[in-house]
Image: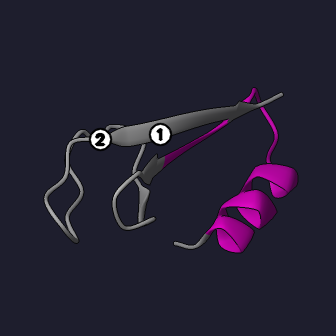
Amino acid sequence: MNIAGTLRQWLSKRSGPLVIQECRNCGTTLSDDGVECPNCGSTSVARYEVP
């Protein structure tokens, strides 16, 4: 899912802060429990919380 899809999903059922995890190496959006990027294998993950 891309960031626009994630934001649309969050806006439709806002129950708390939106958490976006993104691979710092290739920019792939990861699932909430993602610790390794399925695209490039990197474990460097950026985490953004949107209130």
Where does the magenta region start and end? 3-21
Helix, strand or loop at mark 2: loop
Q: Quadrant of residue 7?
A: bottom right
The residue at the point 84 percent across, 28 percent down is 51
Q: Quadrant of residue 4?
A: bottom right
Mark 1 in CB contact with mark 2 (< 8 angstroms): yes
Q: Name the amino acid, label 1.
A: Ala
Q: Position of residue 20 (x, y in %)?
A: 58, 45
Of 47 and 25, which appears nearest the observer?
Answer: 25
| Residue position marked by numbered label 1 in the rendering | 46
Q: Position of residue 3 (x, y in %)?
A: 65, 66
Of 43 and 5, which appears nearest the observer?
Answer: 43
The residue at the point 20 percent across, 42 percent down is 43
Q: Position of residue 24 (x, y in %)?
A: 40, 51
Vertical side of 3 occupied by 45: above or below: above
Helix, strand or loop at mark 1: strand
| Residue position marked by numbered label 2 in the rendering | 44
Of all residues shown, which one is farthest toward the front?
Answer: 25
| Image-based side of 32 in relation to 25, left or right | right
The residue at the point 79 percent across, 65 percent down is 8
